[in-house]
Image (cartoon, helix red, strand yellow):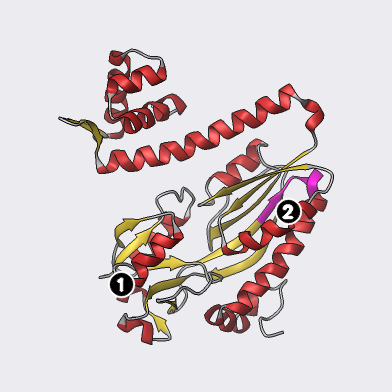
């Protein structure tokens, strides 16, 4: 049994209402129908998602994470349904340029130039924390342009009828730690030296990165001990700054008070920056590429750790200049 939207809506409704009966009313179903569906889903997954208590129906730790991911997936489905319905109601609103971008430091700079990408089209922008959904939406025709990251060495799915360009061949990730950490005094940190650290992770990254990251840690002899999950950069920074956790950061990330970025020795973790587009929006994709290149280089020059690495590894960015130019 594959989980479908109706299963996700059931899980989200129970988590939101804390009650089987209230969830049933919200879904326009009977209480026995919701209870039966929940038992089937839990049986399929092999885990308990909810427990009954005097205060109602409470999610287990696994249930809370499943509910969070269900909300994210349902938001994507609802957005797509809304966009398709609007097209059917009002075809005169076309043309429409739909862009999907993985959240990254360059995004805040790109947003200042969105109006120049397609002056004669209406623009829709979608931002995802991970790169998992964007290729799928491009393949389905729900997006026209996608800008996202994928792990170095990752074999991407075939995207027939689409153009693909790697903007940066290898972008090494950095580890962020409190400036009071003894490791912060080192120029680089070995990956296996992080085995005893508590990690911060993103609960909404549905792309290939989480598995890639854990495989690299396993190769260094450990599995990351994740104790904190957050999508909010302010909360994440406070956890790292306090010394409670360490986290993976993109090398173009802006400096943060109390947080030190360090390279991992040998750069065992890296990612590519990829631009994919439909052939009929070639001009807009070209404008996005040119804007990205300019803004990205500004970020490289602003990050000393990455700027030094960038100049030492011209093979990682054959189409872009050195940082000191």
Report which quarter residue 278 is drawn in.
top right
Tally of numbered tags:
2
Q: Which residue is mark 1?
A: 243
Q: Position of residue 48 (x, y in %)?
A: 24, 34
Give residue 96's mark: none
Residue 43 visible? The answer is yes
Q: Which residue is mark 2?
A: 114
Residue at 31% over, 80% down = 181
Residue at 78% over, 26% down = 91
Quick one: quadrant of the C terminus?
bottom right
Q: What is the crowding at mark 2: few (fewer than 14 residues within 10 Å), some, or many (at least 20)?
A: some
Above or below residue 41? Residue 320 is below
User: Which residue is most to the left?
Assistant: 54
Query: First in sequence: mark 1 or mark 2?
Result: 2
Quick one: quadrant of the N terminus?
top left
Q: Left or right: where does residue 286 sit relative to residue 110?
A: right
Q: Left or right: where does residue 66 sit relative to residue 299?
A: left
Q: Nearer the viewer, residue 206 or 258?
A: 258
Q: Left or right: where does residue 109 sit relative to residue 305?
A: right
Q: Position of residue 133 (x, y in %)?
A: 55, 44
Q: Is residue 280 magenta?
A: yes
Q: Which residues are magenta?
A: 275-281
Q: Secondary structure at mark 2?
A: helix
Q: Is residue 173 magenta?
A: no
Query: Marks 1 and 2, how far apart in space?
Result: 38 Å
Report which quarter residue 303 is drawn in.
bottom right
Q: Position of residue 99 (x, y in %)?
A: 68, 47
Above or below residue 86? Residue 213 is below
Residue at 35% over, 39% down = 66
């Amino acid at each position: 049994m594959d989980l479908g939207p109706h299963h996700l809506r059931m899980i989200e409704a129970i988590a939101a209402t804390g009650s089987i009966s209230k969830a049933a009313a919200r879904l326009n179903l009977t209480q026995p129908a919701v209870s039966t569906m929940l038992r089937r889903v839990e049986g399929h997954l092999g885990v308990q998602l909810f427990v009954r208590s005097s205060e109602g129906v409470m999610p287990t730790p696994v249930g809370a994470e499943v509910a969070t991911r269900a909300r994210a997936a349902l938001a994507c489905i609802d957005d797509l349904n809304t966009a398709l319905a609007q097209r059917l109601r009002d075809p005169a609103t076309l043309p429409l340029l739909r862009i999907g971008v993985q959240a990254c430091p360059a995004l805040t700079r790109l947003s200042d130039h969105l109006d120049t990408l397609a002056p004669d089209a209406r623009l829709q922008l979608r931002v995802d924390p991970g790169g998992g959904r964007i290729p799928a939406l491009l393949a389905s025709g729900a997006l026209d342009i996608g800008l996202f990251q994928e792990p170095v060495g990752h074999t991407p799915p075939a995207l027939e009828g689409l153009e693909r360009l790697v903007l940066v061949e290898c972008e090494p990730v950095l580890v962020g730690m409190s400036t009071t950490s003894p490791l912060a005094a080192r120029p680089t940190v070995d990956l296996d030296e992080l085995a005893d650290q508590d990690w911060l992770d993103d609960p909404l990254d549905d792309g290939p990165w989480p598995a890639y990251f854990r495989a690299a840690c396993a190769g260094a002899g450990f599995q990351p001990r994740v104790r904190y999950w957050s999508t909010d950069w302010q909360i994440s920074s406070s956890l790292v700054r306090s010394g409670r956790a360490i986290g993976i950061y993109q090398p173009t990330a802006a400096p943060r008070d109390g947080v030190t970025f360090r390279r991992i020795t040998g750069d065992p973790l890296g990612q590519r920056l990829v631009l994919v587009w439909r052939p009929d929006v070639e001009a807009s994709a070209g404008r996005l590429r040119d804007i990205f290149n300019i803004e990205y280089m500004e970020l490289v020059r602003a990050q000393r750790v990455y700027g030094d690495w960038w100049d030492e590894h011209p093979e990682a960015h054959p189409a872009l200049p050195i940082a000191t130019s």
